[in-house]
Amino acid sequence: MDALTLARLEFGLTTSMHFLFVALTLGMAPLIAFLQTAWVVRKNPLFERLTKFWGQIYIVNYGLGIISGLLLEFQFSLNWSGLTHFAGELFGAPMAMETLYAFFIESTFLGLWIFGWGRMPKVLHLLTFYVVAIAAIGSAYLIVVANGFLQNPVGFVQEGEVLRVVDIAAVFSNPAALLAVGHILPASFMVAGFFMAGVSAWHFRRGTGEVPFFRFSMRLGLVVGYVATFFTIGFGDASVLWVVNNQPTKLGAGAEQVVAQMVAEHGPGDYMAPTWVPLALSLMLAVAYVYVIGALVPIVMLGKGRIERRRFLLGIGVWTIPVPFVTVILGWTVREIGRQPWIIYDVLPTSEAVSNVSAGSILASLVIFTTLYVALVIIGYVLIARIARRGPESLVLGSVLGESEEPTAQLAGER
């Protein structure tokens, strides 16, 4: 394979593995905020335990997502220097803002939330996680703004060999970005919701004694995942319609006329998206409708208090945990592959964005980065699976203060 093919393969693999962490983090943050709010308002210890249990999984996933995101940033300077030189002012600025935003706001307040258990007033402690949840959504928006410019370049002029911003409002209100945010957010809720329901199903299959704990987790996960699926489908359809109307070669609609125009403007080339892109869209839609229909059964049975005795349904819930993850990765792949052969649609061909380095150098980075990402994914999901299997009996989050004070109190009493 040549340098361009290797660079695209490397970016596709690393981005997909990074997005595994992103989807779960983005979807779980509002759910944990909801659980902690219920604890603060209702003062029910069950909600405190729910917050801590799912919060532990969130922390592990978030930390590994940060590491994988840092590694991903190196891709642009190593393999795609043509893009950063040509469009750094438009594409790079939102990426840089997201990095600063994530580290100085999201990570800071997550640290306050982790170490603030028992040390901060409950309401103030809750507000720190509200900042985390809002910051997570803000980070996703900034990333999609950068990607949206690649999909639908707006608000720029070309000066020589670089692009300059002339309308920052157009960049941040890009329809390609706003529709993508509307699609990605509910898709992440779908991932987190069905993940929560699947973990709960695993515990029910093994006869857990924490019935109220996992019944509420399953109810919350199923309802959130079910409702989010409708919004995912809706914004997905809206995105496809927008593409058909604005960038027909991505899906093949009106291809002859548009391809002829692009050949006249940019010279000979393959300006059609791969033929499997529409098939992948149909597959994603089919999976979404399966969830719409199939999730109704456990929701109804859960309302009647009978779901924990239906091992077959619980087994389906466990074994389908990876399906939403695979679906969102497929959606991201379709979004990126559908833009080819452009890295900035109708402005910069992908072949001109790759760095001027040898195929051997990119192959070496492909092997190194892919190995690191595979290790991160394995480590991450082994840790998450371990926490999930142990259940709420092995809570660590928020327990350090209590453990350190109890022996002191005992010694004081003995004296």
Image (cartoon, grey):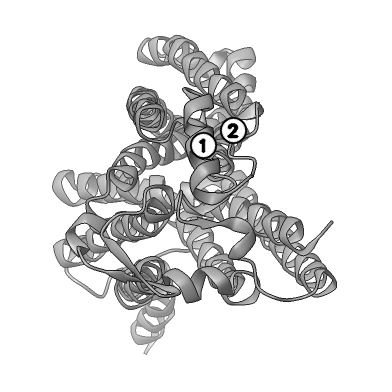
In the image, 307: left or right of 50?
right
In the image, 138: left or right of 306?
left
Residue 319 is drawn in which quadrant? Answer: top right
Where residue 15 appears, x then y in whole percent?
Answer: 59, 55
Q: Is residue 157 above or below residue 331?
A: below
Q: How far is the residue under mark 1 from the one under mark 2?
A: 5 Å
Residue 195 got which mark?
1
In the image, 148: left or right of 194?
left
**The C terminus lies in quadrant:** bottom left
Q: Is residue 344 above or below residue 125?
A: above
Q: Residues within 10 Å of mark 2 (few under 14, many from 20)?
A: some
Residue 397 is drawn in which quadrant? Answer: bottom left
Residue 269 is drawn in which quadrant? Answer: top right
Where residue 293 appears, x then y in whole percent?
Answer: 46, 10
The residue beneath circle 2 is 321
Q: Residue at x 50, y 42 (%)?
A: 262
Q: Closer to the camera, 330 or 86?
A: 86
Q: Is residue 38 above or below residue 276?
A: below
In terms of secondary structure, where does tag 1 sit? helix
Query: Given contact means CB atoms under 8 Å apart, are the residues at marks 1 and 2 in contact?
Result: yes
Q: Closer to the camera, 385 or 99?
A: 99
Q: Which numbered disc, 1 or 2, marks the residue that appears first in the sequence?
A: 1
In terms of secondary structure, where does tag 2 sit? loop
Q: Closer to the camera, 137 or 249?
A: 249
Circle 2: residue type: Ile
Q: Residue at x 55, y 14 (%)?
A: 309
Where residue 136 appears, x then y in whole percent?
Answer: 34, 58
